[in-house]
Amino acid sequence: MLMNLSSWGTGRATLILVALLAGLTASCASSPVEKAFSGSMSKADSAKSITEYCQSCHLHRNFDGEKHVAEARLKFNKDPFKTATDCQTCHSYSTDFWGDGFRATYYPDGKLTGEPQIGKK
């Protein structure tokens, strides 16, 4: 049996359409870490968001972003790694259509390592 949508009235149909659009908009919103890696935040806000993201993992709860960048620079003798001032020099973050996040680390020898993140942060 087919429903006659005209019997619902325009008010209900409009309400349902607005609810669907609101749900789609909310599901497509960028997380702070995505904004940080996209460059749409200031350098200070990006560093704060990325550090908080790293600290959300139990293995990195004591992570110090400034200390990490300073120590990582000492390991390399090639630019831009030896002069890095931010996380985005060596690391990237992206999401797929489903919202699953992927982190990757770049090395001076051109190698890229990446690990999928389980779930959306």
Image (cartoon, rainbow, N blue to C red):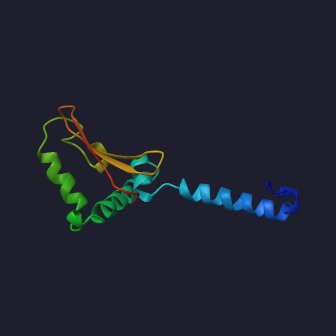
**Viewed as shown, does residue 62 lie left or right of 25?**
left
Q: Nearer the viewer, residue 113 or 90?
A: 113
Q: Position of residue 87 (x, y in %)?
A: 29, 50
Q: Residue furthest top?
A: 110
For the N terminus, the quadrant is bottom right
Q: Position of residue 96 (x, y in %)?
A: 44, 45
x 12%, y 47%: residue: 74
x 87%, y 57%: residue: 6
Q: Is residue 111 above or below residue 30?
A: above
**Viewed as shown, does residue 48 lie left or right of 12?**
left
Q: Position of residue 110 (x, y in %)?
A: 22, 31
Q: Is residue 63 visible?
A: no
Q: Nearer the viewer, residue 66 or 13?
A: 13
Q: Position of residue 21 (x, y in %)?
A: 67, 56
Tally of marks: 0
x 84%, y 63%: residue: 8
x 57%, y 59%: residue: 26
**Viewed as shown, does residue 45 lie left or right of 1?**
left
Q: Nearer the viewer, residue 116 or 3?
A: 3
Q: Is residue 25 visible?
A: yes
Q: Nearer the viewer, residue 63 or 13?
A: 13
For the C terminus, the quadrant is bottom left
